[in-house]
Image: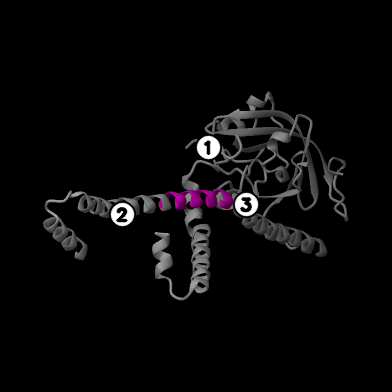
Amino acid sequence: MYGWIWRHLPGNAWVKALLSLMLAVTVVYVLFQYVFPWAEPLLPFNDVTVDNQ
Amino acid sequence: MAATTDTEHEEQTGADGPPEPAARRRGRGAGRIVATAVSVFGELLITAGLVLGLFVVYSLWWTNVVADRAADEQADKVRDNWAEDRVGPDGPGELDTRAGIGFLHVPAMGNGDILVEKGTSMKILNDGVAGYYTDPVKSALPTSGKKGNFSLAAHRDGHGAKFHNIDKIEKGDPIVFETKDKWYVYKTYAVLPETSKFNVKVLDAVPEESGRKKAGHYITLTTCTPVYTSRYRYVVWGELVRTEKVDGERTPPAELR
């Protein structure tokens, strides 16, 4: 999978490394900005109130 | 394709020789597919592990960064509102409390002042503030002067983790609530280290579980416990000892000095 991505990135090793880094940063950004905030309320870690639901 | 024909050809020509090389080569082709599948599966597992690790980083660090930033911003707004009102001789009408009604100081938790806002929804608490209950039991505000229970909730971990050290509060410790012109000094008198999340009675105007039977000016702090989970709720009760007028320098009461 990662090997396949590496082979399909253009340029020489340096360009590939830079592009890989940018891809990784993008993935982390999407996770922190959209995926985790969405997933968090669905997980039972952070309910702090008492209620009758 | 070419490889297959090649193999077949070899099988035919080497009829009297052992068929082993061809079989081994075919086995290698299938093996390659298995190897690829295994490596992709392995990479997916590594990825899943990294994502889970990142989620921990997000929950315990990043949400704090975001929440503290939001809380600071709102706290500044509240302080500004207070300061501006002080300039005017009698203050033009009602005080703007949308950004928060005051600050909670609990020296035992050792994390400075906690902004208090209305409501205990995740949207509000995720800004790194404490919220006073409007549901299921409506909180009594100390500013109203009436007897009742000032019930609050805040996060134990992540999103500012304002009540992280709630377990450091012991009987007799002060809990001070600061508003524009008054300090409300409460004293902790009971702690419930573990209770069901359905136990809404702890928010009652007279929280009988704390041992009090008569109406009074109470304060209740709730959060989740044990740390990093939401299995139970941790409750701390305090009772109003006295109020102090805020002076020009906003000198904190003796308990905070």
Q: Does residue B133 lie above or below B62 as drawn?
A: above
| Chain of the residue under label 2 | B
Q: Residue at x 57, y 38 (%)?
A: B137
Depth check, mark 3 against mark 2: the one in front is 2
Q: Which residues are magenta?
A: B44-58
Amino acid type at image mark 2: Arg
Whole-number angstrom distance, CA of label 2 to CA of label 1:
56 Å
Between A4 and B49, the one lying in front of the other is A4
Q: Which residue is mark 1?
A: A51
Between B222 and B69, the one lying in front of the other is B69
For the N terminus of chain B, the image quarter is bottom left
Do callouts 3 and 2 point to residues on the same chain? yes
Q: Which residue is mark 3?
A: B61
Quarter holding residue B156: top right
Q: Which residue is mark 2?
A: B32
Amino acid type at image mark 3: Trp
Q: Residue at x 20, y 65 (%)?
A: B2
Depth check, mark 2 against mark 1: the one in front is 2
| Chain of the residue under label 3 | B
Q: Name the secondary structure under disc 3.
A: helix
Does the residue at mark 3 contact the one at mark 2 (Cβ under 8 Å)?
no
Instruction: Indicate which disc, 3 or 2, sits on the residue closer to the N terminus.
Output: 2
Q: Name the secondary structure under disc 2.
A: helix
Position in image of residue A41 (x %, y %): 49, 47
Report if residue A42 lies within the magenta region.
Answer: no
Do callouts 2 and 1 point to residues on the same chain? no
Position in image of residue B49 (x %, y %): 48, 48
Whole-number angstrom distance, CA of label 3 to CA of label 2:
42 Å
Whole-number angstrom distance, CA of label 1 to CA of label 3:
27 Å
